[in-house]
Structure formats: structure tokens, C-alpha cells
Image (cartoon, coloured by chain):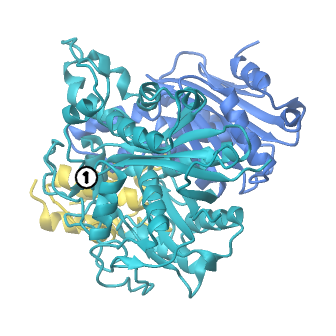
Amino acid sequence: MTEFSFKITDFVRIKNQRIFHRKDLIFKTEKSLGLDQFLKEAYQNLKITYPKFHKMDGLCKLGILASEVLFKDHFISPDTALVLSNSASSLETDKKHQLAMSEMVSPAIFVYTLPNIVLGEISIKHKLQSENVFFIENRFNPELLMDYAEVLLETKKAPAVVCGWIDLKNAEYDVFLCLISKEGEIPLSKENLKQLYLFENE
Amino acid sequence: MSDLRTELKQSIIEQLNLEELELADIDNDQPLFGDGLGLDSIDVLELIVMLEKDYGIKLTDPEQGKEIFASIDKMAEFIEANRTK
Amino acid sequence: MNKGIVVTGMGIISALGNSVAENFSALTAGKTGLSYPEFFQTNHSNLPVGEVKFSNEELAGKLNLHEDHIFTRATLFGTIAAKQAIFQASLSKDDLKETGFISGTSVGGMDATEKYYQEYEEKTGQRRFIQAQHPGFTTSQIASYLKLGGYVTTISTACSSSANAIMLGARLIKTGKLKRVVVGGTDCLTKFTLNGFNSLMILSEEFCKAFDDSRNGLNLGEGAAYLVLEADDVLNGKPVLGRILGYGNANDAFHQTASSETGQGAFLAIKKALEIAGLPPEKIDYINAHGTATKNNDLSESTAFLRIFGENVPDFSSTKAFTGHTLAASGGMEAVFSLLALQNDQIFPNLNFEIPMRETGLKPVSELKKKKLLHILSNSFGFGGNCTSLIFSKNEE
């Protein structure tokens, strides 16, 4: 069964002011900070030096933070595919653009009114020129992600795949990214993806 | 006289989200694009919006942007010559 | 286990008309669908657009929708186009129960939000459209109306969305995960998009001139287009419109909205598509280019052409001066146009072209051209660096 020949090599979870690398809590903020402050502090804490970060919208910042943690311990080939999804699309930024339209449209805001820009930002930062896709689903759909990742890996379109969920709505974020490849102990399966997504604190 | 230049530096840092920069980090004649501050094409468009919003100058060709925004000095000169606000 | 993927149905609604036949007629007559906003309310009425010349009421009438329907403009387009495709593919009620639906969109129900957002708080009349803002809602409305019971999902990768939907559908059939799927995309004109693109200064006040040295931007368009894809071993003698032989996707990794000078994303996507198809570059008879007529895209795309094809760049044209740039729907529309080209051995012209770009000297096909066509490459490149190339081939017995 092909279901078990690929592994969930690594994973990251960002929710409720916490960042988990695998099941280890690597960053948390004490009080309920606003989204912008949380993102800024996480950026500083993770010692990322990438000034373009500050120009991005919330969704892209979350993507950069998550991928930074996920890629830390691995060599990431430029063929690593990206398969991401969410429910809210780019709604937070869409709202900002809508507001700006009543005064003066900001091109820097408009540029982020598409959820797949996060794929572009991750690709630019990590020099990936791989296949990438963004799905809009009502909720986290492990089967979709697994199917897509498997097709890419089995047909050798990519040596590794980053897949997951990255949602931002009403300043609430819900991020789960995992790296799928032949390495690691956790077999790739719908159940395992779901379990890891549901894990928040032990 | 140097107020406009200070104003511009402040605007640029805010508008373009150059969070890791202070006013003192930007020299008046330092190139803003390429190796300078590393601004890109979207930044040019944002500066074009700023020109209209804050100084009443409307640019229709983004290509002009690269020259006008080459440095703080160049920007200030252009604005002083053309501002309607 | 690798099955061949064939197209058994197609449907389209665009500025050229409300059927494949109407679109084909305009393409062969060289008659553009570009005009000025009529149904679309905007202050920028000087900007040419590829507007579908039907009001929402007329479209709803064609679908016999009741008064309280929740069909936004993109949903109306999508349902009409997908319905045509399903009809042509002669899908039975039982077939539909197992047929999947993969649809791309960039704005979803944004047009309704623009119209009704202000009144949501005080009045209740239009609140049913609140849920329609969600791009997934557009997809599920279409699937529900057409009784598509298989796997349903929405792809949102800007201008490459429907091309990616076609690619995903093809893959799912090839690997045996699906027998049959309807794929494509839909988008409508919105103030959101028009104002946004205007702020990027890439809209033209003239009818766009792809690949011309004096090109100065794109015209937005709207509409929808869908294909029915099936595995070639379940056909039972059904007529085949063409095959999907290859597909490729890659990220340009350069900038959020501009393409790299070397056209790297395009180059990689085309290369992958050729590899999957098992074709050397010289077998491509025609390229339906992304060709938006922006300074940036056309140069980047041309550079990719030169890198792949060297001195022998095949006949190519952009059909966006016919329909406008229909964003997420463009990949699907251009798939329909590519299949029409294959069926009729005709290359549709790149309207408004006069002078080749000084950097490349390349000349697109600027008049309707009769030519035996076996393999066509179709490109769709989206914001976020998302580049997709598809190869359509004639079904030879």
C-alpha cells in the first residue's frame, strides 16, 4: 500500500499565540497580543533576517514563520512542492483593500489579495521553483492534501512536499504545515495528518 | 529646508514598512533602489500614490518613478518643483 | 495504470458569446469582444473590458432560478458554461453522481459583496449573499445545481487557477483516482479587481496589443469555461474533442506580481509539460500564449519561448484581445480555444499586433491561419509566480 511508503518528516503548528515545532513548544507570548505584535515578536524570536517580511500581509507572514521553522533542520531542494489550503482565502487583506478603495488604493495591499501569494513569498525566500497549488476548502482536508502529495511524490515530480493549512480570519490564525518525504518515522496517512492537526497542547 | 527631506524619510519608512530602519540610516543622496535600500517595483507604485496623496502630484508613467525616486534629494527636488499641496 | 485523458465536453461564456459556437464564430471572424462597461458599474468607464453582455437577471432566467437565488455573477457564468460541457459529454444522472468538480476563481462572490455590503447591517433583504463571498461557495453552488456528486474543490491561484484545475483533474484521472471530472474556472468584473489592477498601473486605455513593442497594459474580462475530462477506457464510443497529453506547473520565485526577466517559471512549466507529454519542442504546432499585453509578461513569456524553442519558435498568438484577461477563467477559456483550433486546424489571430518587440523580434500570428495542428501548448501565468502550461493534442485513432 503506497499509503505508508511516505513519511511526515516534520511539522509545525501555529495557533493561540503559540508556535510548536513537532510537539515542542518553541515560542509563546504571555498575554493576548494583537496579530501584528505576535507576528513581529515571533519574527524576532526566530531570528529571521528578512526585511521584506514587514511588507507582507498577515497570511504571508504566517507562511514565512511556519516555513522557517519547518525548513530549519532539513536541506530543502528547489523542487520541493507546495500544497497549501485554507477556508478564508485572503479575506483579511481583501477587507483592507476594500477600505483603501474609498480613499486611495494601495498597490502594496492589493498585491496580497490572493491566497496563493504566500506560495510565491515562500518560494522567493527559499528559492523554490517547484510545483505549487492553493486550495479553498471549508475545513482542513487531510485526504486532499495526502492525495496530492502522494501523486507528486510517486510520479517523482517532487522529492518532498510541504502541505498544510494556513488560515487567517478576524485576526485568528490556524496554521499547520508539514514536510512529506521518504524520511522520518510517522507514516503519511489521513489519520496521522488529522491527529497532528488536532494536537495543540498536551 | 531639510524638513521635507526628513518628512520624506519618515514617509518612506512608514509607507513601505521598512521596520528595521531608522531615519538616520537613510542618507539624502543614497540610492533607494537596487543595492541601496533594495526597493522594488511595488514600492515605486506606493511612492507614486504618496506623491498624489501628500503633495498633489499625479504621475501617469511608472517608468518616470525610477528617476524621480532615485534618492531622497532627487525626490525632494522634484516635489519642490511640482507640488500643488 | 496510467490512463489517457480525453476531453468529451466543453462549455464557455465570454464577451464573445454564450456558447462554444458563438465564441468560435467571433474568433474566426477576428471580431473582438472588447467594449466599454455597460452592466458593470464603475467610474473607470474609459477602460475597455471584455464584458459578458448579459445582465444577472437574464443569466438567472436562462437557469430558471427562483427569485431568492444566491447565484452571484461568477456562479451564473460557471453554471451556464459547465452545463454546456456536461450536455456535450452526454453525462447521465448516474454518471453525474460520480463526476468530480474542480473550479478556479479569484473573486468568487465579490460582486455581490460590493453591491450589498453597505446594507447588510441595517437591512436583511440581501443577507443571504453574505455566505456567497467565499470562493468555495461559488464552486459548491455550481456543483449542486448540476448535481455533480463526486469530489469537489476550489483552486485559487490567480490567473492560473483554471489551468491548474485542468491539470489536477487530468492527474486524478491518470492515476485512477477519478473516472470523470468537470474542470475549469469562472470570474466576473468587480471594482475590487479593476481598482486593484489600476493601482498596479498595468491596465491599458486602448484595446490590448499583446507582443507588440508599444503594448501598454491589459484589459480585464469576465466569463467562465469548463471541460469534461474522462479516462479513455470508459468512453463506449463517445466522441472525443481532444486529449490532454501534458501539463506542468512551477513557481517563478521572483516577485509577487511581476515575472522574472528570464521567464524562469514559464520556462520550467513548459519544460515539464513537454516531458510529461513525451514530446520534443519541435512537435508543438501552436502556442496559445498567456500574452496579457503588459510590458512585463509578454517580454518574460517571449524569453521563455526563445529558451525552449531556440530559433524555431512555433506559431503563437494571444487571444486576450478577443475576451480580455478573464483572470481565473482564462486557462479554461484558452483550453476551449485550443481544442477548437485542433478540431478545425485553424490558428486564431493575435489582434491589434503591429510591431514586434525590439528585444526579441518575434511575430505572433496576426490573421486567421489554416494549418494542420496536432499538438498545442497553452500557457497561464498567475500572480504569486504560479506558472502553468498545458498540452492539448488531437485524438488520432
Disc 1 designates what residue?
B50
Query: With A43 as the anchor, is C209 left or right in this view?
Result: left
Q: Position of residue C114 (x, y in %)?
A: 24, 32
In the image, the chain rendered in cyan is: C
Q: Classify the position of the N terminus of chain A by image quarter.
A: top right
- C274 or A54: nearer the eye? C274
Figure colour of chain A? blue
Task: State the image quarter where residue A194 is shown.
Answer: top right
The residue shown at (65%, 36%) is: A66
Q: Amino acid at mark 1?
A: Met
**Closer to the camera, C163 or C25?**
C25
Q: Residue at x 60, y 52 (%)?
A: C6
How far across and how far down the image is residue C112, in percent? 27, 29
In percent of width and height, residue C291 lies at 40, 67
Instruction: Residue C163: give x, y in percent of width and height.
Output: 52, 52
Task: Indicate the secondary structure of the residue bearing disc 1.
Answer: helix
Q: Quadrant of residue A174?
A: top right
Tell which chain the image draws in yellow.
Answer: B
* Residue farthest to the left, as pictured: B84
